[in-house]
Image (cartoon, rainbow, N blue to C red):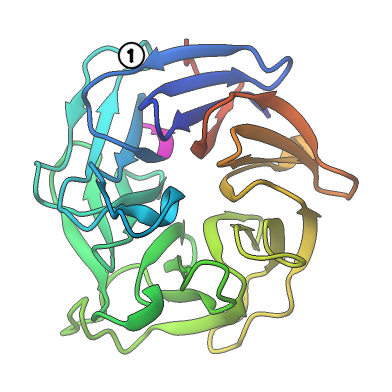
Amino acid sequence: MFEALLALGIRTGAVLRVSTVDGTVETLHTGPAGSSPDGVVVTAGRIFWTTMGRPVRDGARSGEAGLDYSARTGGVHSMLPDGSDVRDLVVPGAMTTGKQLTTDGAGRLYWGDREGLRVSSIRVDGTGLRDLVVNGPAPDRLAECVGVAVDPGHGHLYWTQKGPAKGGRGRILRAELDLPAGAEPEDRPDIETLWDGLPEPIDLEIVDGTLYWTDRGAAPDGNSLNRAPLPAPGARGTAPEILARGFGEAIGLAVDAPSGLAYVSDLGGRIWRVRLDGGEPEILVDLGTPVSGICGVPADTEIH
């Protein structure tokens, strides 16, 4: 059960601790360790997060659509739970746009690199950086990788490719967690498309054989929290169950199955609480600034 969440302020650069009991907020870190944080996870006694880097404003477009993150200024960072000992795991210039971050629980981190068109991995000590998926350029943002989840027990990697904004062309894909013998990340023979034609899937999480994901696409099926059983090898995904709708650009996800709850963050600045057995979502806290990634902090984890 989660006693707290970690949440990222995409504009403020802050790493926040949010109580799941009353929404009390504590700032753990704000500073120069990368710009535009997006994905966060707790493992190996440390907090890890990705950053998208420094965007360039495209004057022809307004809002988020006018932010160009194609420069290689993203990163992966870590710190102790008290906010000290901040480190860079990926050297500047080695990646483009760090998105959702997850772990296999055995010493490796995995993330989507959106404008980098890839899924990458590194050990928690900063060694062993490698690409697992590398897509070729494609129009309409169809090659951009965003959300990631791993299923070490079955040896699988899952990721989202969201497609154009509100475009209804998003996909969720799967491959082996390790590259097949002789294969390159640019040309993997084992990639399966499990779902396509989704509004705009973002972050993923696997719990007890079920895949959960947020979707920031257009209504009625976008801006939603979804779930579906993990497909058998070679099978397509079944139609997802929509657990909740009405978020303000849904991004982050943390599923607390023992409590029967999921938490969703959105660019509207809110973190929502959603019952897994149905019902309207409730606002846990309104942070007043866009929130990107979140993760759960179990009750036996010290994050203060």
Residue 128 shown left or right of residue 57 in the figure: left
Outermost residue toward the right in this view: 279
Relative to residue 225, is residue 49 depicted above or below? above
Q: Secondary structure at mark 1?
A: loop
Residue labelled with disc 1: 83
Residue 177 shown left or right of residue 301 in the figure: left
Residue 285 shown left or right of residue 146 in the figure: right
Badge 1 amino acid: Gly
- Residue 262, position as x, y percentages in the image: 71, 42
If the image is split into quadrants, where does the N terminus sit? top right
Residue 258 shown left or right of residue 112 in the figure: right
Q: Where are the magenta residues, as a range? A: 39-44
Residue 304 visible (yes or no): yes
Query: What secondary structure is the magenta-colored segment mainly?
Result: strand
- Foreground of the two, 169 or 112: 169
Relative to residue 92, is residue 207 depicted above or below? below
Q: In percent of the image, x 28 and y 62: which residue is there?
A: 115
Q: In percent of the image, x 33 and y 14: which residue is there?
A: 83
